Image (tube, helix red, strand yellow):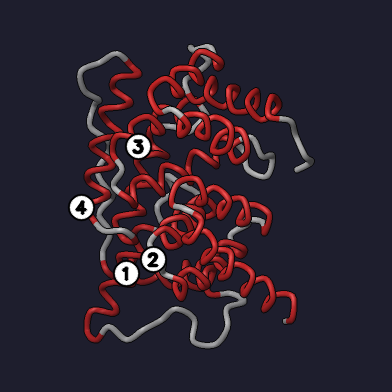
Amino acid sequence: MANRTHSERREAGQDVLRTLRGGKVDGATAAAANEARLGALGSYVTDFALGDIWSRPGLSRRDRSLVVITILATLNQLNQLRSHVQGGIHHGLTRTEIEEIFVQLAGYAGFPRAIDATTTAHAAIADLQGVDALEPGAPATPKQDAERSADAKAVMRQLGANQPPGGVGVDMGPFTGTAGRFAFGELWSRPQLPMRDRSMVVCATLVTQDKPHELRFHLQAALNNGVTPLELEELMITVIGYAGFPTAVEGFRALREVEARTAGS
């Protein structure tokens, strides 16, 4: 982005504050409240996290909310997650899509974090709707192992295209088949979130967890699923604000390796 004045960055950050809160607050008032509560940190929330990162055009605000919700759930930062779940709703994510982020995270960040995140999200959305509690969501459709295996093979053909030899596979002994049927035959096969968005979720959680080997596989899988290189760069830039520079640098390193291999193939 071109050089901007502080006033331009502050104005951009205030606009993000306004949209995160559904247009129900004045951005300047919200920014002043952050500074009153947090001092210099509050200034940088508006000017850098929101004004420099969130205001970039490479990701829609809906997609950036999806990434931020994933990162916060991975870190189990439930107070911030509550706020960003409401922001995600204001940016166009549906309740079902937010719930599905956490369904996907059950396989990639563990059930405890996924359960805590879902519970927090339900409370946040109920508060937005002005109800005490949400109606229960639909349970998963039961699938027999033969169907799970067939669906897993189809997903793996999609994710595994253009991968270097060896991929991410590892022999987990007799549990390998069970794990694959769940991760690829159940989670990745669910229609409630497109594979493109699932790739964004998985890349965001893997970089947050500092899992570079698995991340490289899933960066290529994300490209297979229609995520653009620019969108993956924006994902890593978003990580700066929510998991820190060192974590984002490792993510960028993995992304550049995938880009270099793809360019040379």
Amino acid type, mark 1 = Arg
**249 in relation to 33, above or below:** below
At horizontal 67% and vertical 79% (from top left) the residue drawn is 261
Label 2, residues with CA under 10 Å away: few <14, some 14-19, many ≥20 = many
User: How far apart are the two marked residues, 3 and 2, measured between alpha carbons?
Assistant: 27 Å
Q: CA distance from mark 4 to mark 3?
A: 15 Å
Residue that numbered label 1 is attached to: 181
**Rendered image: mark on residue 184:** 2
Query: Marks 4 and 1: in contact by CB < 8 Å?
Result: no
Which kind of residue does numbered mark 4 sit on? Pro
Q: Where residue 246 sits in the image (x, y, percent)?
A: 48, 61
* Lower position in the chain sequence, tag 1 or tag 4: 4
Nearest the viewer among 105 and 148 is 105
Label 3 to label 1: alpha-carbon separation: 30 Å
Q: Which residue is mark 3?
A: 81
Give residue 190's position: percent from left, percent from top.
40, 52
For the residue labelled by badge 1, is the local secondary structure a helix, a strand or a loop?
Answer: helix
Query: Could you tell me how far apart the alpha carbons at marks 1 and 2 are, in whole angstroms?
Result: 6 Å
Instruction: Pick the residue in front: 126 or 187.
Output: 126
Q: Earlier in the sequence, mark 3 or mark 2?
A: 3
- Do callouts 1 and 2 mark residues in contact (Cβ within 8 Å)? yes
User: In x, y percent, where is residue 166?
Assistant: 49, 87
Q: Amino acid at mark 2?
A: Phe
Tag 4 residue: 112
